[in-house]
Amino acid sequence: MVEKVYPISFEIAGQAAMFTRPDTGSSPVSYPAPTKSALKSMFECVVMSKEAYFEPQKIEICSPIVFHKYSTNYGGPLRKNGTGNFQLFATVLENVCYKVYGIIKAYQAPHSDNNPQHKLQEVFLRRIESGQFHTTVFLGWKEFTPSYFGPLRKNTSVDSSINLIIPSMLSTMYSRPTEGSLSPIFIQNVEICKGVMFYAQ
C-alpha cells in the first residue's frame, strides 16, 4: 500500500531575516538560508497540532543572498543580573524571498475517523489563503515580520545564480517535532545548487 502524501507549500518575503548560527556568539551572524526549525516556526504561526507536524523538505531562494549589519537594544533574558538594556550587533540577511516545500507527517497512522495529517493540511491551506494566522509570522527573529506570506506567487522565480555549500547547519533544536527535549542536531555540507536547497542531505 502506497502511503498518501500531504504536501504543503508557501512563499515568504521580507526586508530582513535572521537565522542564527549558534557558533557566532554575542555578535550573531545569520546562515545564508533558513533552518528547518525556522520554517517549522513559520508554519506553526498559522496552525499547530500535537498529533501531526510540518516537515520542510526544500526551499527555493528567490532573491540574492545579501548580508548587512544590524543593531538593536536588547532587554531579554541573556542580560547579566542588574544590568540594563545593551546594544546588540548582528549580521542579518536583507530583502529575502523563499518558496518553501514540505509535507505533513504524523506520529501515528491515520484512521478513517481521525486523520491528523489531512486535518492539519486542510486548516493550514484554508488559513493561508484567507490570511488568518494564529500569531504573527516572523523571519527568524520576531521583529523581522514578512512583507508577504501566503501561497506561491507565479511572478516569483528561483535565483539560479546561487551556488554554495554551508559546512554545518543547525537542523533542529529538539528530540521530536512537538513537545521534545533540547537535543540540537546539525547537518553537514548543505548544498545550495542553482538557488535550491534540500534539507534531507
Image (spheres, helix red, strand yellow):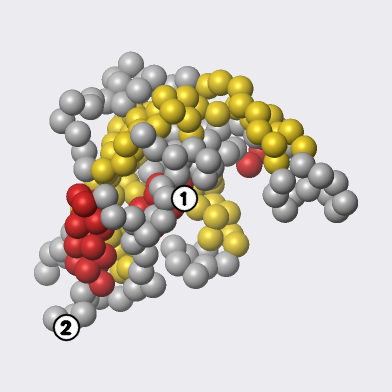
Residue type, numbered disc 2: Asp
Give the residue displayed 30% in from the left and 76% down from the top: 108
Give the residue displayed 30% in from the left and 32% down from the top: 60
Closer to the N terminus: mark 2 or mark 1? 1
Instruction: Report which residue position mark 1 lands on.
Output: 37
Q: Quadrant of residue 151?
A: top left
Point out residue 34 in the picture as x, y percentages from the top left corner: 44, 38
Residue type, numbered disc 1: Ser
Q: Residue furthest bottom?
A: 113
Q: Is residue 138 visible?
A: yes
Per the model, the C-alpha gap separating discs 2 and 1 is 30 Å
The vertical placement of 88 against 175, above or below, is above
**Which of the pair 40/79 is nearer the observer?**
79
**Which of the pair 60/186 is nearer the observer?**
60
**Which of the pair 86/199 is nearer the observer?**
86
Instruction: Report which residue position mark 2 lands on.
Output: 113
Q: Is residue 144 left or right of residue 88?
A: left
Element on which disc 1 rests: helix
Point out residue 176 in the picture as x, y percentages from the top left corner: 47, 65
Give the residue displayed 21% in from the left and 80% down from the top: 114
Q: Is residue 8 visible?
A: no
